[in-house]
Image (cartoon, grey):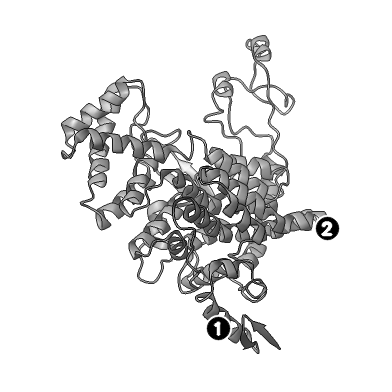
Amino acid sequence: YQRRVRGVSCNFTSTKKKMKVFQGLWTKQSSRTLATSSFFQRFASTQSGLKERLAQLIPAKFEEVKNIRKEHGNKLISNCTVDQAYQGMRGITCMVYETSLLDAEEGIRFRGYSIPECQKLLPKFKDGKEPLPESLLWLLMTGEIPTQQQTQSLSQEILSRARLPKHVEQMLDNFPKDLHPMSQFSAAVLGLQSNSHFSKAYSAGTTKDKYWESTYEDALDLIAALPLVASKIYRNTYKDRKIASIDSSLDYSGNFARMLGYKEAQFDELIRLYLVIHADHEGGNVSAHSTRLVGSALSDPYYSFSAGLNGLAGPLHGLANQEVLEWLLEIQKDLKGAEPTTENITEACWKTLNSGQVIPGYGHAVLRKTDPRYTAQREFALKHLPNDPLFKLVGKVYEVAPKVLTEQGKTKNPWPNVDSHSGALLVHYGLVEQNFYTVLFGVSRAFGVLSSLVWDRALRFPLERPKSVTTEWVKANLHSCLLYTSDAADDLLCV
């Protein structure tokens, strides 16, 4: 049949011709036109095979979990002290989160693979050296390292889903420039909810065993839309409100970089690295747990991820890299052009500690060694920007701060985490708008938390509803608190 698209007569006699015409138009039209055109929505869809692979994996995993619960459901896996109940539930093992696991010594593992292993094994973009976020998405979803072809197909499928409804574009265009980028980001994600497959399927009476399918569709649609949303926020707030068109010859990160306004291949590589290492960090952190908690109420992925973003916006979570950068820039200012040395950085660290503050970017709630995500960024900097002044400062702080913190004796982990490096890399390439950094973090975190949400639905995890008590209850039961047993389900677990 024939369809006339913007004055171009297209004879779609085969899928191959269909995609050829689509790709030709993709590079010519503006992202705004593509975002709303019926042609884009109707003919751009490709099939990566990821959903089909999940359909193969889910039944066996569901039975595995079912059998574990049947045979071992009443066994104890964790204790909870009174102090833990008051102090953010730190260290309590109380949830199953399939996509990643944080080891105190090795750092994060994505489906069993460490950061260095992911950098080595996951497919890259053409002559690139950093793993593609699309390949990590496949790994998080399936537990399997994808082939280059699977990664390329998934990349094309995600790009084909990249569109914004007109009302979301208008909403972003109407936001005042002084509205924080994270507020814009969270609101726009909620605006995208009008297209939720899960919401529509649930209203239509879909069965529990099918929940994961519409959740998957929402997850991929949302992941695809996030660079468009983030770029529009960035260009509207800080630049000229113009966004580059999507280029089908580029990957997810390359297109994201172009829409932000950056054309360097090195910056593409940085975005790939950034999106991969920030993608997931176990299920207990604020953004991951918020997404999961809201999702457990069968709120669709848009509601759930928006909640996660709101948690990510907090100073104790996603704003940490800004605090690090501000601290580094203040030291740089105090040095007045002098090279960072062991002596002057030691003095700067003690000055910070003696003022009652912490050295930002050092220490972690779980890790007890240098964060592998920090190491990955350091290696990138050593390769691409070894003489950058801010990177030199970061490196000198890395030499000095652990010794100072160890001497002070108040921290269990004096080593740097991921936040102590990322800001310096972004500044090098000219992305200096610090309030936007958490938006980048949010784009990355979607890969992990939405993959996990798909599996929550596939495994039919129930509504989360932990038991809480009052201080009066604790006082009344301090002398009688016992270990949790199946016969005392409502008791606070105390040891």
Name the image quarter holding residue 82.
Answer: top right
x, y percent for residue 154: 55, 68
196 is higher (above) or lower (below) than 73: below
In the rendered structure, the answer to whether residue 140 lies left or right of residue 382 reads right
Q: Position of residue 450 (x, y in %)?
A: 60, 52
Toward the right, the furthest residue is: 205
Q: Which residue is mark 2?
A: 204
Residue under the image location 44 percent in, 59 percent down = 260
| Front-most of residues 434 and 316 | 434
Q: Is 395 left, or right, of 187 in this rendering?
A: left
Mark 2 surroundings within 10 Å by alpha-carbon count, few (fewer than 14), some (14 through 19), many (20 or more)? few
What residue type is disc 2 on?
Ala
Whichever of callouts 1 and 2 sits on the residue coming sooner in the sequence is 1
Residue in the image at 53% along x and 41% along y: 312
Can residue 96 be seen in this snapshot?
Answer: no
Q: Amino acid at mark 1?
A: Lys
Report how many numbered discs are placed on residues in the image.
2
Q: Tell me where residue 226 appears, x and y as whole percent.
A: 55, 56
Q: Which residue is drawn at the image coordinates 59% and 45% (left, top)?
A: 97
When asked about the image quadrant of residue 369, the answer is: top left
- The reply to whether the C-beta atoms of the residues labelled 1 and 2 are less than 8 Å apart is no
Horizontal relation, residue 188 to residue 250: left or right: right
- The image shows residue 209, relative to residue 331, as above or below, that is below
Please, is residue 325 above or below residue 87 in the view? below
Label 2 SS? loop
Label 1 sits on a secondary structure element that is: helix
Res 20 label: 1
Residue 264 falls in image quadrant? bottom left
Q: CA distance from mark 1 to mark 2?
A: 36 Å
For the C terminus, the quadrant is: top right
Picture coordinates of residue 180, whole percent (x, y): 52, 42
Q: Which mark is residue 156?
A: none
